[in-house]
Every structure is written in C-alpha cells, then in structure tokens.
Amino acid sequence: MTLSSLSSLKLSRVLWPALCTFLILYSLDELATIREWRTSSCRAPLLPLLSRPLNNDGAAAEEEESALLAAGGSPIPQKIWQIFFTRPGFPSIQHHVHDWLRHAPDYTYTLLGSQTADAFVRPHYGDGERGAGRRDIVEAYRAAQNPALKSDLLRYLVLLVEGGVYSDVDTTPVAELGSWVPAGRRPDVRLVVAVEHDELFNSGNEYGYPVQFSQWTIAAAPGHPVVADMVERAMAGLRDLVAAHNVTLDQLVHLPNYDVVNATGPIAWTEAVMRGIGAVDPEMTHPGNLSGLNEIRYFGDIMVLPIEGFMANMQRVANGEDNFGLVMHDFQGAWKGQ
C-alpha cells in the first residue's frame, strides 16, 4: 500500500457507549513503564489506541464519517497526541497535560514515549497485513537518533494514519478544542495550521521563509494529502542530511537547529502546506503571500490561523483582546529532546 492510497483511507471512529478521556503516562526515568493515569466516567474498556489496526473497510468508514458530518461534526478526530522522549532536567509536563484534558473533555489523549512510538510505527508502516508496506519509513524512524528529527517525523506519521490534534508538550490550550473550527466550517475543514513567523513581526536566523507555519501544533483529519506530502518531504530531508554530512542516519545525533528545521521542521512543513494551498489557489505561490495575516483564511479544506493562533498571549486572551489565540507555547525546546 502506498502513502497516496493510505491518504485516502477513512479511519473508523471508536464506538464506545460514551466517549472517554484517558491518558497514558510514562515514568520519566523509564518510558517503557506505562500506566493509566486518568479516565473519565466510562463503562467501556479503555483499549490502547496503538493496538487498534487500521480500518480497511472503506464503505463502513465512509458511512460512519458521513453520519458524523451530517450531525455537524468534524472530520478531525477527537484525539490529542503528544510526544515526550526522556530529557534530563526538562520541566514537569503534568500541568500542561492537565490543561489539555481540561480543554478537551471528550477527547482521547495519548502521550507517546520511545518504546510505544516504535510500536506505533512498525505495524502502521511496515510490511504486515495492515501496514503501508513502507519499510524505508520504518527503518528511517528506527535509525534516527537525533530526537528533534525523530519527533518531527513521528508527529506526521501519527497524524497521517490516526488524525487528531498534535501539540508539543510545552504547549497549553487556551480554548476548548471543539471550538477551534467555527461551527459553520466544521464539516469541511480537514487541516488546521497557524503562522509561526512573519517577518513583519519577528525575525531570526532559523527562518527560511518570510512567513512560516508552526508544526508544534497541527490538527488534521487522517489521510490528509498535505500530511502525506510532508511525510515524503521529511524522508527526503533525512536523505539530504545523510548525503550532506556523509554519515549514516544513526550517526546524525548533534545537528545545528537550522538543519533540523529545514529537513523535517517548520521550513519543510511550510513547503508542504504551501503546496496544498497552491493546489487550491494557484495565485498563492509563496508563503510571503500570507504576510500580515490578521484573519482566518480558508483554502479548500485547509484553515490558516494568524500568528497568534498557536502562539497566544495569555494576558491578551484574559483581557478578551485575542480573537484567534487557541494555544500558548512556552518555547521550552521540547522538540530538541535533549
């Protein structure tokens, strides 16, 4: 199965009598140790998400999604994904986790650590019966030792097959997740992104374009073509790094930040998003076309938020001055992982 065919798959929603909110937490000194940390009132068993195979019954999945959309729902699943690889000295993430749970009472929450991430990638992208047959992806993920490269690739792999909301562990939601997409647009929006950099407002030597999109938070429907494109872009970025440094992938441990953001991070993500936007609006030929964005823009099923969307100012939010802020980012460097 190719990624292009994978991107067209519809994933079945979990049919529980009541939606459950749960959290899998990892002992910070041993990520292999997992325990159920919090559950809402629920009669159905809490099955680990990672053990649930892809639903290849296209007709049934289509019927379920059609029913969901007819009820005014969203094609973006009610799932929250975060990644935490061991990092000595990194501040506690529990208060961030509490905030995510508080703002998403009907969502499932999964925190992926090193071993469970491996357990996710192998069956979904390997050669098994339900896998995508992409041994190159499995091997690249397994070989990658730089935690930022690994975390970047993992978020795209998870969103491609599962969908939902991915956000770094040093982020905090400031709005209910169910309200992120305006009600009238909810059935149509399948990807939510936000500007992270606009040269009109901020600058830095790690920015490759005058406008870039954040990938510390992404909301996507499973199989979105922009995410599928990004997986391929990330794989190409890894190959380019290996060639440029004349080493094997497992030897790429310590890298300049720019190498990471260009290979698998915001620069690469911006290119993938712009290809998706350009496919809908051919006049959108460059990220700079979105400079000075001060309102939500829609390009087909892609919703683009202004710079404060995923970089909210808490004081402005508290004062009712921020109309677009959904997520606050603490910029603790969680993506570096070390």
Image (spheres, rainbow, N blue to C red):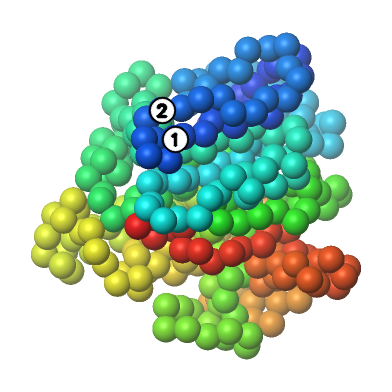
Residue under the point 36% across and 18% down: 129
227 vs 32, left or right, is: right
The part of the image, by quadrant, that contains residue 217 is bottom right
Q: Find residue 33 and name its label.
A: 2
Residue 187 placed where, x, y %?
A: 77, 42
The residue closer to the viewer here, 166 or 13, is 166
Residue under the point 75% across and 56% down: 174
Mark positioned earlier in the residue sequence (2 or 1):
1
The part of the image, by quadrant, that contains residue 100 is top right
Real-space Cα separation, disc 2 to disc 1, in angstroms:
6 Å
Label 1 amino acid? Ser
Where 172 falls versus 110 (above or below)? below
Residue 155 placed where, x, y %?
A: 47, 47
The part of the image, by quadrant, that contains residue 70 is top right
Labelled pair 2, 1 in contact (Cβ < 8 Å): yes
Task: Please name the residue that numbered disc 1 is placed on.
Answer: 27
231 vs 331, left or right, is: left
| Residue 325 seen anywhere in this rendered image of the structure | yes
Q: Quadrant of the N terminus?
A: top left
Please tell me whether mark 2 sits on a helix, a strand or a loop.
strand
Label 2 amino acid? Thr
